[in-house]
Amino acid sequence: MPTYNAPMENIKFVLNDVLKAEQLTKIPGYEEATPELVEQILEEGAKLCENVLFPLNMVGDAEGCSLKDGVVTTPTGFKEAYKEFTEGGWTGVSGDPEYGGMGLPMLVNTVMQEMICSANFSFGMYPGLSQGAYEALHHYGTDEQKKTYLPKLLTGEWSGTMCLTEPHCGTDLGLMRTKAIPEGDGFKITGTKIYISAGEHDMTNNIIHLVLARLPDAPEGVKGISLFVVPKYLPEDMSRNGIVCGSLEHKMGINGNATCVMNLDEAKGWLVGEPHKGLKAMFTMMNAARLGVAMQGLGIAEVSYQNALAYAKDRLQMRALDGAKAPDKPADPIIVHPDIRRMLLTSKAFCEGARAMSYWIGMNLDISIKHPDEGVRQAADDLVALMTPVLKAYQTDMGFEVASLAIQTHGGAGYTKDYGVEQYARDARIAMIYEGTNGIQALDLVGRKMGAHIGRYLRRFFHPLSAYIEEHQANSDLQEFIFPLAKSFAKLQQSTAIIAQKGLKNPVEAGAASVNYLRQFALVAMGYMWVQMAQAAQEKINEGGHGKSEFYEAKIKTARFFFARMLPEADWHFKAVMAGAESLMEMDVDQF
């Protein structure tokens, strides 16, 4: 049976020693979010994840959800766990106190997302979608809509969804057919939406759907899309609205979450934001969702790594190549073998690096929302916008890879259901697809973010990294990391210039380079995180270790592995970028 223990020591290291998250207490509204309080909250969250959510993970996978007469029943224990989750206030951790939220930094919510996704990926999607609905309504809803919906979303009494995809259109929302006809104080909305996560379930007494649709006078394409709030039950009298679940999708994984086909038959809805500008409002929800999906990639990787490590320490097979390491046993634990160590260290280096990268962006999200200085807010917002597609794509790619490595570490046992790791691979696979496929994230990076505001977004990352390298290049403790990082960064700048130059003449060149560029970018960004973690660990060692010298030494050894074995992958992606589009595009369709 699989196990999960929240990595609290690693979490606290990143928050306190690397990011110095205490700086958030200087921002108005976050004064009470001291390291001590945050630690207490996260410790309680860890207990919930370990003791309540994790035991239901395999149950949810085995049972799945069922649909009868338009009503979805969630797996055994989910409803009770959700009640405990909401009673603990976890749905309102980062919510606006004006509407009943705790008002804690988004960074706390980011950490909780990681632990929830490790413990029970499918369960975490229910409150995760509600968070996105809350964000969209908080930004674009009318005062009346906020008063009606936000308090219930924050208590968890009501949940939320996002309804975008239709049977004939996914990413290309300009092809959308769902119609909204004005009637009375609202609209009558008719259409079909598919792949709606948490679209129908039995855990709340109302579900608030945010639906994209077209008004009668809507222009063609994405400029003619409006956003509507469509509740399952109408708030004024709790009468049933005309939005129902027509069927459940039969999926490869995330079986504990209800993925629904939602049919709207003149369902009553109300406009959110301005007519024909719904895509902008929905992207507030989408960006929150994409960062949440990045945490899914990290969360599934962490629990996969933990179980691979436990198995590798316990499973006996053959002797070490340089002589027996456990002479009192019939064979050595497989962790002595180089290839097992390669898989474990790849997983460990990714999880710890992605944690630092995710929390860094989570902290900047807080700065972008509440910092009193407009310039500081803008800089942080730019960085979050730039890094969102990078985190979503890279961390979900690697989440699946680490889950696959966990299966490989287990050998034949990993391919059976007994050890639980095969579920992690099945669950992880969807994160590379939904909320915009990872190929779309790469196009977003090179097509929107790279050239935005004459490169302003890129400068929010390039300039601090360049300054850090210059500041620490003479630091003898860091030279083994700074020099390879500097070389990789130089090649990233070169890739950026080449894509910008070629892409202006032929957008196909930018598209052909996009996936490799995103991966190159992600590896350099993770290198930036790893050198900072190595710096923080070395500083603690220089201070005497504080009783945790082995922990800090392990950080530096893991950094060495990353720079020796993982960062060089960026060079390969650099070469692929430089190769151009010709080899991808020259073949005729009939020649495939």
Image: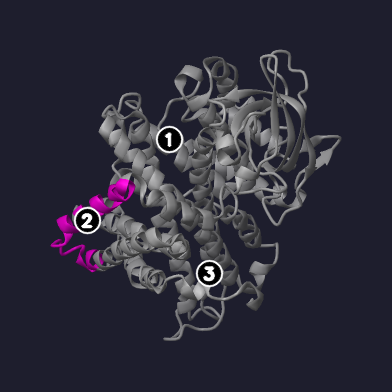
Q: Which residues are magenta?
A: 454-483
> Given this view, does label 2 or label 3 mark the residue nearer the observer?
2
Query: Which residue position holds label 2?
Result: 466
Closer to the N terminus: mark 1 or mark 2? 1
495 vs 226, left or right, is left
Q: Nearer the viewer, residue 295 or 549?
A: 295
Residue at 58% across, 26% down? 153
Task: Label 1, secondary structure: give it.
Answer: helix
153 vs 94, left or right, is right
User: Label 2 vs label 3: CA separation?
Assistant: 40 Å
In percent of width and height, residue 232 lies at 72, 26
Residue at 40% across, 32% down? 105
Q: Is residue 274 magenta?
A: no
Q: Is residue 479 magenta?
A: yes
Density class for disc 2 (Cα within 10 Å; few <14, some 14-19, many ≥20) is some
Q: Are marks 3 and 1 in contact (CB under 8 Å)?
A: no
Query: Which residue position holds label 3?
Result: 312
Q: Main secondary structure of the magenta part?
A: helix
Question: Callout 1, which amino acid?
Answer: Met
Task: Label 3, secondary structure: give it.
Answer: helix
Residue at 15% across, 55% down? 471
> Given this view, does label 3 or label 1 mark the residue nearer the observer?
1
* Vertical position of residue 372 compared to residue 61: above or below: above
In percent of width and height, residue 283 lies at 51, 38
Q: Are marks 1 and 2 in contact (CB under 8 Å)?
A: no
| Residue 22 disc label | none
| Residue 106 disc label | 1
Closer to the N terminus: mark 2 or mark 3? 3
Q: Nearer the viewer, residue 335 or 34?
A: 34
Residue 403 in which image quadrant: bottom right
In percent of width and height, residue 277 lies at 53, 32
